[in-house]
Image (cartoon, rainbow, N blue to C red):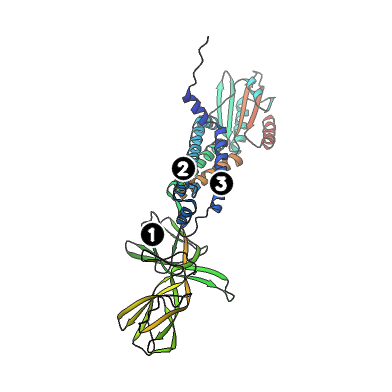
Amino acid sequence: MAKKKERNWGIWLWELLKSFKLAIIILIILGVLSLIALVLGEVLNTRFQNWDVYYAQKFGENLFQFLKAIGVFNPFHSAIYQFFLILLAINIVVCTFTRFKYYIHQAFSKSFRHNPEDFRLVSIRDNFHVKKPADEILSSAEQVLKKRFFKFYTSRQNGHVAVFATRGGLSRFGYVFIHLGLLILLIGGVITSKFGYSVYRWGGAGDVIQPPKAPFQIRVDDFKVITDQRGAIQDYIALLTVVENGKDRFTRKVQVNHPLRYKGFNFYQSSYTMNARAITDAQIGVTLKNNPAHDILLDVPFRKKVSVPNSPYSIKVTDYAADFRMENNRVFSASPQPRNPAVEVAVYRGDSLLYSQWSFLYFPDLHKKKDAPLNVALRSFHPAYMTGLEITTNPGAIWILLGIAMMTLGILLSFYMYHKRIWILLEPDGNKNVTVYIGGATTKGKRQFTKEMGKLFSELKS
């Protein structure tokens, strides 16, 4: 019984990696993954503040960490997406390497045809007799072809002369440039996928934002929401300062479609929300103990001291919570929406702090101090807004641009430059007659090249 031939796994793997079918399969998989990523990006939105806390509460901590680990919340940076990108890059390298020798041979080899039988393999061909010396015909052919920018080579053998002329051999490398461009594009994509990111950060006036992996910080100096007379939002503008090594480098106004760019990092004005822990100002009602019938309404800017008229006292709004909650003696806001707004008001006599109390908009008597020299109550307030910045960095951008440039060059070479080759064989018969065999081939544009060859036939016959 014949022994079963064992498969050579090394050869099998090499054949697989250089397969064009593998490239098609990988591209289909990447297309499907990209479509899934786009859908997940809409379903599982991460472009809001504390999105990780929200999904951890929604799915549970264990399931959330699992989904995060497999890249559900950031599919383009997931391990499986990067794996197929790298596999496609390997496929391109192997394909290019195995075919490069063929491209070199086609572009630069001098293939003379010394036998009339060889011209039967050429699709565009003719043969005729000319009563001229072979050298005169050769000189005429060289002159005609060089005018058309052909490189002209001759070979003499056994009394006859063979000619090989070529033009546009560089077009053979079009596919090489396309493959290398795609490879460089993939390298840029992998670099961006591995080291680049797109994150959202929120900040109000005075907040300092630390972009991931950046050697500097961004300070939000101001943020304004611009509205028209009807209250419709027209624009939102952030004033940002780059802080590096503890020093302010420069300040830039950032608005929609006008990002801040610095050291490869981009800061886009993406969104905004109400500030859960700050306001612009508050209207505080003040009642003095010695004159309870007289209620004073003061407009108090956030964290600025305001004097109470006809008294030695002053007040300052020191804190704010849009949706007041307290846990373990720690005040926090459950959301940025003013569902249970409250302000902390500090009461001073001169420069001395007498006490602080929280005043609630919807529960004015809550935490009211009975023996206080004055009572305060939150009547209304103007919310402050936080800017939502999309911070991106794309360290593979230069590679992506280089890849696109190489692919463009490859496309131009492949589709707009033709490799044309012409073979001529001159066979003198000893009676001052020369039999001329001529043929030509082109990679593209056969109809136009046929006309060009017809003109060459006519010039050599004359």
Amino acid carrying mark 1 in the image = Gln
Residue type at the position of mark 2:
Ala
Residue 64 x/y as whole percent: 46, 49
Disc on the earlier residue, 1 or 3: 3
- In the picture, the disc for residue 79 is 2
Residue at 40 percent across and 78 percent down: it is 368
Q: Quadrant of residue 378?
A: bottom left
Label 1 to label 3: alpha-carbon separation: 31 Å
Q: Is residue 129 above or below residue 362?
A: above
Checking the image for residue 444, the label placed there is none
Marker disc for residue 36: 3
Q: What SS does tag 3 mark?
A: helix
Amino acid type for the residue under numbered disc 3? Ile
Does residue 238 show up? no
Which label was assigned to residue 210? 1
Please tell me which residue lies in front, 244 or 319: 319
Contact, mark 2 vs mark 1 (Cβ under 8 Å) = no
Whichever of labels 2 and 1 marks the residue nearer the N terminus, that label is 2
Q: Is residue 35 above or below residue 52?
A: above
In the rendered image of this protein, does residue 235 appear above or below residue 293? above
Answer yes or no: is residue 48 visible: yes
Q: Secondary structure at mark 1?
A: loop
Q: Residue furthest front?
A: 370
Helix, strand or loop at label 2? It is helix
Q: Is residue 196 above or below residue 209?
A: above
Q: Which residue is nearer to you in this view: 282 or 427?
A: 282
Where residue 17 appears, x then y in whole percent? 51, 31
Cα–Cα gap, marks 2 and 1: 26 Å
Q: In this view of the protein, which residue sits in the foreground, 292 or 190? A: 292
